Image (cartoon, grey):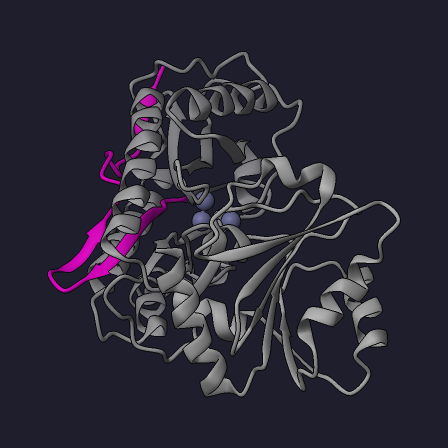
Amino acid sequence: MFVERLDKARSLMATHGVDVLMLSVGADLPYFCGYEAMPLERLTMLVVPRDGGATLVVPRMEAPRVTERPDVFGMRPWDETDDPVAIVAGLAGAAEVAAVGDHMWSRFLVDLMGLMPGAEWRRASEVTAPIRSVKAADEVERLRAAGAAVDRIAGRLQRGEIELVGRTEAEVSAELGRQILAEGHDRVNFAIVAAGANAASPHHEAGGRVIAEGEVVLCDFGGTMVGDDGVGYCSDITRCVYTGEPPAEFNELYDVLFEAQAAGVAAAAVGTPAQDVDRAARSLIASAGYGDYFVHRTGHGIGTEEHEDPYIVEGNREPLVAGNAFSVEPGIYVPGRWGARIEDIVVASPDGPDPLNRVDHRLAAVA
Ligand code: ZN
Ligand code: ZN
Ligand code: ZN
């Protein structure tokens, strides 16, 4: 699988005229070699020349963490007194065009630029994003398993099995985090809990606010499930509940959102330009008069990273292809008052949109 992925990378390198690909901290590295760099000050880097074998440059003290895959990459451990940047530059040889991981730290890039003064620099995502954004069947199944896990948590939330009233947002967020791990994830990526007026802030950070009766509680949470091959796949879901009976005005807002989200999912077919999925959801919200309250794009791709290509946003005319996996998550946010968002992960498949989150989309009233 890794060999196949690197083959694809090499062929895109040829298309884009890239001589060497350099991957460090971030999701590219595990995707292409099954090893995730420690985000510390010591350099870890997979150096992939277009013509030639890949080498993993890794601190000697971290080398025992690496599952060696001699058919995929060679190992070049470095000692504390070595200059890892010089080792990388040596492996890059006379490369004229180098593509570096989007999340590589600038301290290493700046040093590399010094040692490779003639090189032209590109983002690795030119090469990696088109590959990562098209999921193979086994990747879809891993995303589906992660989605089913957070669906079970959302179901408990909707049935009132996760206590809300009287607890702080932060306490509920911590509880969601524990459940994300208990449901088989290896990492919690986020657990937004936003009550009442806080729900009008799309990326609200759960805090000390105590959840009261008679308010909306927006929960947006997800994590990463890492497989035996060292590659992790993410979940991401948003559901809202209301502590008590929602007022008519909120129900009206929510009904619009419900229809808009369903329209976005229904539009997510192979061949549809990504922006048309955004338009499908946004037009319903706008025509109901809430247009100014939908302040973000409709969705983002998801895979080994929580946010990746394709982005479901006006201006992205790229047609969806089978295997694209992304969120459909419109929201309506009324500052100072309340807000709501509904989010599913959807895969564009030859049989139509395939939602990986199937738990109820309606607004549950919980005690
Ligand atoms: Zn978000
Ligand atoms: Zn989310
Ligand atoms: Zn999302």
Measured along the vertical axis of the image, is residue 360 above or below residue 90? above
Is 333 on the left-hand or right-hand side of 23? left
Percent from the top left, x then y, of residue 287?
33, 65
Residue 205: x %, y % from top left: 63, 36
Looking at the image, which residue is at 45% across and 50% down? 304
Q: Which residues are magenta?
A: 341-367
Q: Is residue 313 visible?
A: no
The answer to whether residue 24 of the structure is visible from this angle is: yes
Looking at the rendering, in which quadrant would you find the C terminus? top left
Residue 348 included in the magenta stretch of the image: yes
Q: Which residue is pictured at 37% across the width and 40% down the height? A: 249
Residue 338 is situated, as x and y percent measured from the top left of the image, at: 50, 40
- Figure quadrant of residue 86: bottom right
Q: Which of these two is toward me, 242 or 146?
A: 146
Could you say where residue 173 lies in the image, as x and y percent from the top left?
A: 54, 25
Question: Which quarter of the image is occupied by the N terminus?
Answer: bottom left
Is 359 magenta? The answer is yes
Residue 52 to residue 108: above or below:
below
Q: Is residue 272 toward the left or the right of residue 107 in the image?
A: left
Check the image and name the residue furthest to the right.
81
Residue in the image at 62% along x and 35% along y = 64
Query: Across the whole image, how many numbered discs are drawn on residues?
Result: 0
Q: Is residue 344 left or right of residue 12?
A: left
Q: Is residue 343 left or right of residue 167?
A: left
